[in-house]
Amino acid sequence: MCMHRLYVFGLGPLLLGCLAACETQVTLTPTLSAQAPPACVIAAPLSYDGQPAYLPQVISAQPAAEPATTVLRYSYDAQYNAKQQITALQPLNPLLIVGFPTGSNAITVSGLLEVLRDGKPVRAYAAACALKRTSTVFSEGETLTAMRRRALFLVRDNISAQVCRDQQGLRALLAGDRPSIADKQPQ
Amino acid sequence: MSSRRLLYAALATGAMAVLLSGCATLGPAYTPDANAPRDKGTVYVYRPKAFGGGAISYTVSANGTELSSLPAGGYFVYYATPGETEFSAKTEAKTSVTVDVKPGQTYYVQGTIGMGVFVGHPHLTQVTSDVGAKEIASCKLVPPAAPKAVAKTGS
């Protein structure tokens, strides 16, 4: 009976704790309110040389007939941080058989959408996402490739939401590039 | 008695064979590559010597194409086509890291080995130029194997 209790109340939570540690932890900033932002599409000249899938979906690249003074520029960056070396005492750790972590992988992805006027940023929307997961002798969990892709999508959607919340201000800013429309703006 | 000795000899030979199978003959010490095409990115894939897992070697692939084996203390150079390139390796577990390659730029992918149940788990990660340039200095070139040498340059 005592051994049974030891298994249930001792090893059980330990195993569950170790298994829970295998899940990828996600931190995304800024944190936006749960309320869904209004849908929008912002059409503007765009400067972007990355994968189309990672571009915030609210942005529609508009071809400029002549060099535009106001353009949107989107860029992202990914930084890896892995700790996976075998240390001298690690093979002697008996907790490895219940899934004790043997290392960790982390990635931080940042995205930045800037409104450039004459080459100078006049407004910016930024987001960052950090993903971290631990590995065990039984499982490595998500690969860094999968974590990077997930983080880029989260950053993309976060910036999309920020843009849609601020769409009136952004549209006014972009309209300033077109004299015919800008002249009608109230002072 | 003689059969027991024979058994010990067989076990010792087997153990040595397993241990030495991971050892590889490495080439010259690291020198920066000066032959990189301008329209490609240069990726150094290296694996510093470490406490454990030195006998284990694994094959590194780029976008699914096998490039070279990566023993402890070895490195090789890969000229990647601009864009996303996924470097991967597999033993009993899979690892992969994606590098956003730009022409004319240099990147470092670091390989290590972690603990596994039957065999070590390979790990690949991208490191900064500062870290990569420092760690690769103690590595030696992995001689290209005949069939894999074709894949040195990205498509």
Image (cartoon, coloured by chain):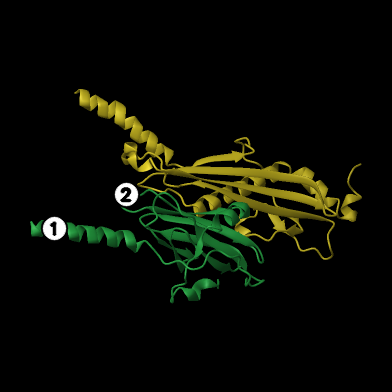
Chain colours: A yellow, B green
Q: Percent from the top left, x then y, of residue A170?
A: 77, 46
When the figure is inspected, residue A61 is found, relative to residue B28, above or below; the finding is above
Residue topped by disc 1: B5
Residue topped by disc 2: B117
Element type at marker 1?
A: helix
Q: Is residue B68 left or right of residue A81?
A: left
Element type at marker 2?
A: loop
Mark number displayed over residue B104: none
The amino acid beneath tag 1 is: Arg
When the figure is inspected, residue B101 is found, relative to residue A154, above or below; the finding is below
Residue depicted at x 41% and y 37%: A20
Q: Percent from the top left, x then y, of residue A107?
A: 55, 47
The amino acid beneath tag 2 is: Val
**Res. B123 in view:** yes
When the figure is inspected, residue B123 is found, relative to residue B69, above or below; the finding is above
Q: Residue B35 versus residue A27: which sits nearer the camera? A: B35
Residue depicted at x 38% and y 37%: A18
Q: Quadrant of residue A186?
A: top right
Residue depicted at x 19% and y 61%: B10
Protein chain holding label 1: B
**Res. A56 in view:** no
Classify mark 1: residues with Cα within 10 Å, few (<14), some (14-19) or many (20+): few
Marked residue nearer the N-terminal end (2 or 1): 1
Q: Percent from the top left, x then y, of residue A9?
A: 30, 26
Q: Residue A56 versus residue B40: which sits nearer the camera? A: B40
